[in-house]
Amino acid sequence: MKGLFKAIAIFFGLLLIVYCVFLLENSGDKKSTEQTIGHWEIAWTSDKELDLTEQNLKKLEWIQVSTQAPAPERPKDATAQWIKIDLPELSLESSTVLISKIYGKHILAIYNGAKIYESDRNYNYEINSVILPVDKVDAEQSLYIGVSSQRRIGIPNEIQVGEYQELLKKYVKGNISDFILGSTLIFIAVIMLACTVFLRSDNLVIWVSLCAVFLSSGVIVITYSSFLYWLFEDLGKVYVTLFDAALFILLPAFTFFFEKVFGPGYYSIIRKFRNFQVVYSVICALLLILNELTSGRIFPIYNLISQEFLGFIMITQFVLLLSIVTIYTIQKNKDAVIFSIGFLILAVFGIGELVWFYSQNSFYDLYLWKWGVICFLISLIIILGRRFAENHEQVVEYSKQLEMFNNELQRSEKMEIISEMAASVAHEVRNPLQVTRGFIQLLAEKHENSEKVYLNMALDELDRASNIITDFLTFAKPEVGKVATLNLMQEFIHIEGILVPMANLQGGKIAVNIPDNLLIKGNSSKFKQAIINIIKNSIESLHGEGDIQVWGYKEDDWVFVHIKDNGEGMDSDVLARLGEPYFSNKTKGTGLGLMVTFRIIEVMQGEITFLSEKGIGTEAIIRFPSRED
């Protein structure tokens, strides 16, 4: 996925470079013979009067117009317009007239009494580009252009006259950027679609929705440009159909992506609006098919629903989503901040142009929205990249937790095995040990001193074996016995009395600071056994002079006890294995002491954590549920 995002970034970079190159080439053109025409004359007629001779055209009532002045109002019964253009004198034997934009469905051009161009479109796209070759021009010749249309009609911009190659190059440079932009978006969508086979099901839906946004945006950018209709005019009806279909897909796909990123919104308003858009798009698609099957007989109905209503739905969508994302931005949602930046650019361009478009009765084409779409799509890519990065982090975290749970499971299995083994053999082993100890003790009393040494050593080892069996029994049957409310200060007074002499004997000191109000539920003897095991380990880690600090406090519903020493400490490998059976740092240790301690604290519904650093010391943090009086 990182490679895909890198490829998308490269495509956008190349797109920007190509566009800048076009700008530089346009600004660096050499001086040419091109001339511009900014004023001409028009006459209003009907469709039936579109095919007139040049002599009849001269008899029409002509009105002077200019690109610098507002366009004249169209008479109610006028369905066509004739345009009379006085061409400037040119020294070229063969010149060319470039009309980069002219509105109309049926266009007819007459020059020197002959028809030199005609285009009659049977589809709903009235933006045309016309390149007309003319002979050597003198001051008395005029070019007549007839245009018919039920909607916009006429020439909105200046007309260029000059050499054919120069004008063609200028026209292509001015329009090829839309083609490149749309093609790039479609290519990115195809790559994204091919990558869906590598995605998990939880990421597939949001990825496909973004793919639909890219694909439909690319198709809209290409099919909205007049360059494609000029290049392949015979396929114009296909382009118009693709434009409408892409628009019907874009809006619900965009809202669906928003819903997947930010949720259904307050009172599920985003989900409800998306469902409305889906229904609206399906209705428009059915009307589109029906309009094609009936050869355009229901076009007025289709045009009303799919175009007139669509603009207001888009404005509503922009305002709704922008309002919601603003709320999320205030709540410091990072995705919302990224989304709002890209969406704000798109919304400003989109809403501004839509409002301006509907406020104009004649000449205006939407073009700023394309760059707003690019900015917005970049923000969507960033959001999706962050989403995948977060998913990756969650997978890594899940793997760590799974490893931890696996270790805990193995530890539990070991403990279970030891418990079963201890419960089954401990009693049977203890009885013969006690009998053997008794006989050895009798023998020791009757033998001389030289033999007593060996017998006493045997007694010590039997006592040690008995203690190990006791630990096994404690682990196998960890019931805390008689449960009562324990005052920790009173318990630690007894523990301190037992362990302080032992610490002093080795040169260490124990400082205990336990408040009087710390109460827990448990068995006094078992609690003392667990705490004594921990403090004894701390004393043994001192190896001479050192301090052991013991303190406690209450936090929320828990009572905490800290036991901290400045002994030899442990590294991370040893720390991770604390509580494992038969694992010990001591020469004669069995590892059962801490194992029993862990089990006692667990039965008392407590938790224990060790913090340690080699050469600095170890701290045990124990917590128990608090018990009120």
Image: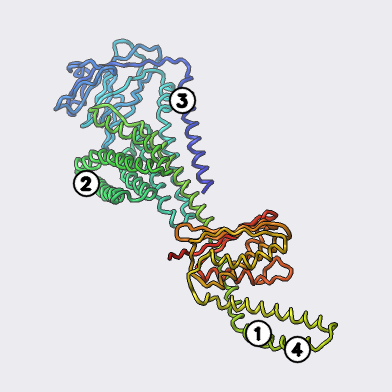
User: Is any part of residue 582 visible from this angle?
Assistant: yes
Residue at far left of view: 77
Q: Given the image, on which type of amino acid does mark 4 rest? A: Leu
Looking at the rendered structure, which numbered label has been put on residue 23? 3
Q: Quick check: 243 left or right of 539?
A: left
Depicted 204 relative to depicted 87: above or below: below
Between tags 4 and 1, which lies in front? 4
Residue carrying label 4: 442
Mark 3 secondary-structure assignment: helix
- Residue 199, given in percent of the width and then of the height, sits at 47, 54
Q: In terms of sequence position, does the residue under pointer 1 or pointer 2 come before the other?
A: 2
Between tags 3 and 2, which lies in front? 3
Q: In terms of sequence position, does the residue under pointer 4 or pointer 1 come before the other?
A: 1
Report the Cα–Cα distance between label 3 and label 2: 45 Å
Residue carrying label 2: 294
Q: In terms of sequence position, does the residue under pointer 3 or pointer 1 come before the other?
A: 3
Residue count near mark 2 (Cα–Cα under 10 Å), binned few <14, some 14–19, many ≥20: few
Looking at the rendered structure, which numbered label has been put on residue 218? none
Q: Which residue is pictured at 53% across the width and 76% down the height?
A: 479
Q: Does the residue at mark 1 contact the one at mark 2 (Cβ under 8 Å)?
A: no
Between tags 3 and 4, which lies in front? 4
Q: Given the image, on which type of amino acid does mark 2 rest? A: Thr
Please name whichever residue, 219 or 137, is drawn nearer the observer in this view of the structure: 219
- Residue 112, given in percent of the width and then of the height, sits at 29, 18
Q: Given the image, on which type of amino acid does mark 1 rest? A: Arg
Residue carrying label 1: 430
Depicted 37 relative to depicted 50: above or below: above
Between tags 1 and 2, which lies in front? 1
Residue 420: image quadrant is bottom right
Report the Cα–Cα distance between label 3 and label 4: 111 Å
Q: Quick check: 35 left or right of 439?
A: left
